[in-house]
Image (tube, rainbow, N blue to C red):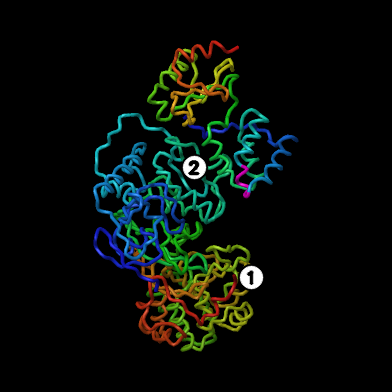
């Protein structure tokens, strides 16, 4: 995992669109405390914009009535939230113990050397983005790679090459 | 007294307070359980794992002492190889990414990580991988400077801002070895107690911009004191030192734990009030336009007092009880009137429901207890009727405008005993510098009616005369501290000897001041 503390400010005020606003209000009835809305609200933001900007975190905190630092904590803890726009294909490589021992570094090195991807960054053409993430919960079939949310297990460089070749 | 229970630590029976957690209960009898994240004011968090101990009653092999209440008959195991191994391992974990920059770290000398390394670790580092690089000297606001690399992620600062000030500026962001404390961009620390996170931080991650690089802590002399910033009278520690060939000076004030008054904390303005002890001080006695020695000026004052006529003494609500009672005795002897007028000390609406009070005077309750009139009408009448006014270190400029003061003292003789240079004293015929609160011993009563005694903290190279001594030399019937306390002991609830006042203070039940403003 890389440092995710740098937030991107769009300089524009953020708010939920009509659909997400209604969804948020609906969700707020479901939870016993308003702080439980932090994760769903981040999901709604990501659904709406594709990523989560600094303004959105402040908006969520104020909308829920909690500290911005708490939403900031949650948004930086969970790598499923994108704190910057992702590439067309967002690749997550698990870096936790089982995957590390089973060779995640070779996969990361391949992506780094062959595709010039840096964890946390988007490729110049906007096609790929790479993130090293904490445990994805598939330790039994390590190492695991997530491509746009889909799991690919027992990975190695050859399988990764084949996977990337199958993409449009 | 709380209920006591007997339990065993390493097979030795000890008697401890029931209900407390093991760190506090066993700590009270002098047995240390190392801990980083637990703080009595913030509760148990259980994240640092440094306080793991064994309980020999079939529980899991190790339990966190901070979350385990002391119970009768409990067999606590501290001194065992598997527990020492846990402590070493936790220390190793904390030190993996620690910069170990102790030689330039302000915390060195009062750092938990340093102390625990010496007590529980003392091994060479096995680390060969590069350390995680994080933020240095980050300005968090309110004079707090943060070093993310030194941080052990105990979360005390985060919990303080969420639980105590309820402002929540700080959070622990990221996860795993990239986790760090930060503020949300554009929302820095913004509360009146923020600098307490510097004290709370067990390591050198939180430092005070004001104290950074000023002094190594082991050079500081630590004197108990009472904050004179407001009527709360928080217990403090005055950290001061005289560097070679230099003037003695105060480097910082820190809260001193007092369960009756301030708990573990003080406000930021109280903490910074030491600056007023260093700056703007009056250093030289003056008679007319000429500089005089204090002795010469005192002789002139004595002559003026002996001339008779109507005299009014003005007392400061910051003065100690000893000063007040000495001045009162002199005034009674001379047939003079007294006024403690100090309306300007009260800033309505400035106080809060934690420590800060509207009234910025340290000992108004003392004035009231001694029956000294504080009203504006009483003050105006007394001054207007007087031929000679003696101002005993009351900063009248806080209560009255320069214009009002100018008119009042235009045709009246004024003598000033002052710790600081003040506008009003330009109109005084004789001015004599006196000691301020960090330079004398005394007693004050706070807004809750709690009497506290504090010793002299700082001794300057040329110590200004203390007000009690000065008034005694002008012929007050009370010539010594013992005389003062003989007089004070006539008041309800006051002891005859200040040495009998407990360190946390004495609750005076009969004091009406205990029921004043909320």
Q: Residue at x 64, y 36 (%)?
A: A56
What range is drawn magenta here? A32-37
Magenta stretch holds residue A35: yes
Q: Position of residue B461 (x, y in %)?
A: 33, 63
Proximity of marks 1 and 2: CB atoms separated by less than 8 Å: no
B247 and B77: which is toward the camera: B77
Asked if residue A154 lies left or right of residue B242, the reply is: right
Q: Position of residue B44 (x, y in %)?
A: 43, 54
User: With respect to residue B5, does B137 lie above or below?
Assistant: above
Q: Which mark is residue B172?
A: 2
User: With respect to residue B482, does B280 lie above or below?
Assistant: above
Judged from the image, the secondary structure of the residue bearing numbered disc 2 is: strand
- The subunit carrying tag 2 is B
Q: Which mark is residue A24?
A: none
Q: Position of residue A37 (x, y in %)?
A: 63, 43
What residue sits right under mark 1 in the picture?
B404
């Amino acid at each position: 995992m890389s440092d995710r503390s740098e937030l991107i400010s769009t300089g524009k005020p953020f708010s939920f669109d009509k659909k997400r606003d209604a969804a948020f209000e609906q969700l707020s009835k479901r939870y016993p405390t308003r702080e439980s809305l932090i994760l769903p609200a981040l999901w709604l933001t990501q659904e709406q914009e594709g990523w989560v900007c600094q303004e959105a975190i402040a908006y969520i905190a104020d909308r829920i009535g909690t500290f911005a630092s708490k939403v900031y904590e949650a948004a930086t803890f969970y790598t499923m939230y994108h704190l910057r726009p992702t590439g067309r294909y967002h690749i997550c490589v698990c870096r936790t113990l089982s995957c590390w021992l089973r060779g995640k570094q070779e996969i990361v090195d391949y992506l780094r050397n062959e595709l010039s991807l840096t964890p946390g960054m988007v490729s110049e053409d906007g096609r790929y983005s790479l993130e090293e993430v904490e445990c994805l919960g598939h330790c039994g079939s390590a190492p695991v790679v997530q491509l746009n949310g889909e799991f690919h297990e027992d990975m190695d460089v050859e399988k990764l090459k084949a996977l990337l070749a199958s993409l449009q | 007294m709380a209920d006591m229970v007997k339990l065993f630590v390493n097979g030795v029976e000890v008697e401890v307070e029931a209900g407390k957690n093991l760190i506090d209960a066993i700590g009270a009898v002098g047995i240390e359980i190392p801990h980083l994240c637990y703080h009595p004011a913030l509760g148990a968090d259980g994240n640092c794992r440094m306080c793991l101990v064994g309980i020999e009653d079939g529980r899991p092999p190790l339990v966190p002492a901070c979350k385990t209440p002391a119970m009768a008959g409990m067999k606590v195991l501290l001194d065992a190889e598997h527990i020492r191994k846990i402590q070493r391992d936790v220390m190793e974990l904390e030190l993996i990414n620690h910069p170990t920059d102790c030689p330039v770290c302000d915390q060195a000398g009062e750092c938990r990580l340093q102390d625990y390394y010496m007590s529980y670790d003392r091994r060479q580092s096995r680390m060969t991988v590069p350390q995680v690089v994080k933020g240095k000297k980050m300005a968090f606001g309110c004079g707090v400077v943060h070093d993310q690399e030194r941080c052990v992620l105990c979360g005390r600062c985060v919990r303080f801002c969420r639980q105590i000030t309820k402002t929540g500026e700080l959070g622990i962001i990221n996860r795993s070895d990239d986790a760090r404390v930060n503020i949300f961009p554009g929302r820095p620390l913004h509360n009146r107690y923020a600098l307490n996170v510097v004290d709370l931080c067990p390591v050198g991650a939180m430092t005070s911009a004001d104290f950074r690089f000023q002094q190594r802590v082991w050079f500081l002399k630590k004197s108990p004191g009472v904050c004179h910033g407001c009527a709360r009278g928080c217990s403090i520690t005055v950290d001061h030192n005289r560097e070679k060939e230099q003037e003695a000076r105060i480097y910082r004030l820190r809260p001193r734990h007092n369960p009756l008054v301030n708990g573990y904390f003080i406000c930021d303005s109280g903490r910074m009030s030491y600056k007023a002890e260093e700056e703007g001080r009056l250093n030289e006695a003056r008679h007319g336009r000429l500089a005089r020695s204090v002795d010469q000026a005192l002789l002139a004052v004595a002559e003026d007092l002996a001339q008779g006529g109507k005299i009014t003494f003005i007392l400061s609500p910051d003065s100690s009880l000893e000063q007040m009672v000495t001045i009162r005795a002199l005034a009674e002897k001379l047939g003079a009137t007294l006024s403690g007028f100090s309306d300007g000390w009260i800033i309505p609406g400035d106080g809060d429901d934690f420590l800060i009070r509207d009234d910025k005077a340290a000992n108004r309750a003392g004035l009231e207890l001694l029956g000294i009139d504080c009203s504006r009408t009483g003050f105006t009448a007394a001054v207007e009727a007087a031929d000679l006014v003696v101002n005993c270190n009351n900063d009248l400029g806080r209560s009255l405008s320069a214009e009002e003061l100018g008119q009042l003292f235009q045709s009246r003789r004024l003598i000033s005993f002052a710790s600081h240079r003040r506008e009003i004293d330009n109109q005084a015929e004789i001015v004599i510098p006196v000691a301020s609160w960090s330079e004398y011993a005394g007693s004050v009563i706070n807004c809750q009616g709690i009497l506290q005694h504090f010793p002299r903290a700082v001794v300057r190279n040329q110590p200004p005369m203390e007000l009690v001594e000065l008034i005694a030399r002008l012929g007050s019937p009370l010539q010594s501290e013992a005389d003062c306390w003989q007089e004070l002991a006539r008041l309800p609830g006051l002891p005859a000897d200040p040495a009998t006042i407990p360190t946390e203070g004495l609750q005076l039940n009969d004091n009406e001041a205990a029921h004043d403003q909320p």
